[in-house]
Image: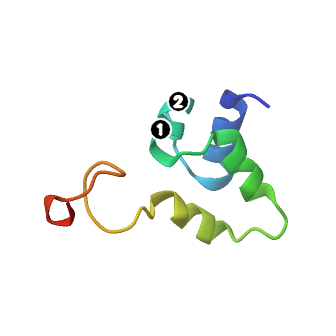
Amino acid sequence: MNASEAAVQLKDKFGIAISRADKFYKTHKISQEDFLLKLNNEGANHSELLASLYDHGEGNGRHGVMNLKQV
């Protein structure tokens, strides 16, 4: 399976609109193919996995950048 096939399946099956594979990886630190494999796993909790894509802890802004108060 290549990235475009994974993007189509993620969009059609799970409603995840994705523009480019490299952008998905940079944002979520997992490839589209690997995430699709996790979703297609029989014991997978889809709502938990989908929520984990956007759960990056507290704070706003770029991932991994600490607030000045934390420094």
How dense is the environment of label 2, judged by Cα within 10 Å: few (below 14), some, or many (20 and up)?
A: few
Taking the spot 60% from the left edge, 45% from the top edge, the residue there is: 30
Q: How many numbered circles does the render carry?
A: 2
Looking at the rendered structure, the kind of residue marked 2 is Asp
**Residue farthest to the left, as pictured:** 69
How dense is the environment of label 1, judged by Cα within 10 Å: few (below 14), some, or many (20 and up)?
A: few
Could you tell me residue 6's position as x and y percent?
70, 37
Looking at the rendered structure, the kind of residue marked 1 is Lys
Taking the spot 74% from the left edge, 28% from the top edge, the residue there is: 2
Taking the spot 45% from the left edge, 43% from the top edge, the residue there is: 27
The residue labelled by disc 1 is 26
Left or right relative to 34: residue 11? left
Could you tell me residue 7's position as x and y percent?
63, 37
Left or right relative to 18: residue 71? left
Residue 20 visible in the current orientation:
no
* Quadrant, the N terminus: top right
In the rendered view, would you say 43 is above or below 67?
below
Q: Are marks 2 and 1 in contact (CB under 8 Å)?
A: yes
The residue labelled by disc 2 is 22
Q: Quadrant of residue 70?
A: bottom left
* Quadrant, the C terminus: bottom left
Left or right relative to 49: residue 41? right
Could you tell me residue 49's position as x and y percent?
62, 64
Callout 1 secondary element: helix
Front one among 22 and 8: 22
Callout 2 secondary element: helix
Taking the spot 74% from the left edge, 56% from the top edge, the residue there is: 38
Could you tell me residue 37's position as x and y percent?
77, 50
Left or right relative to 42: residue 57? left
From mark 2 to mark 1, how far is it between C-alphas? 6 Å
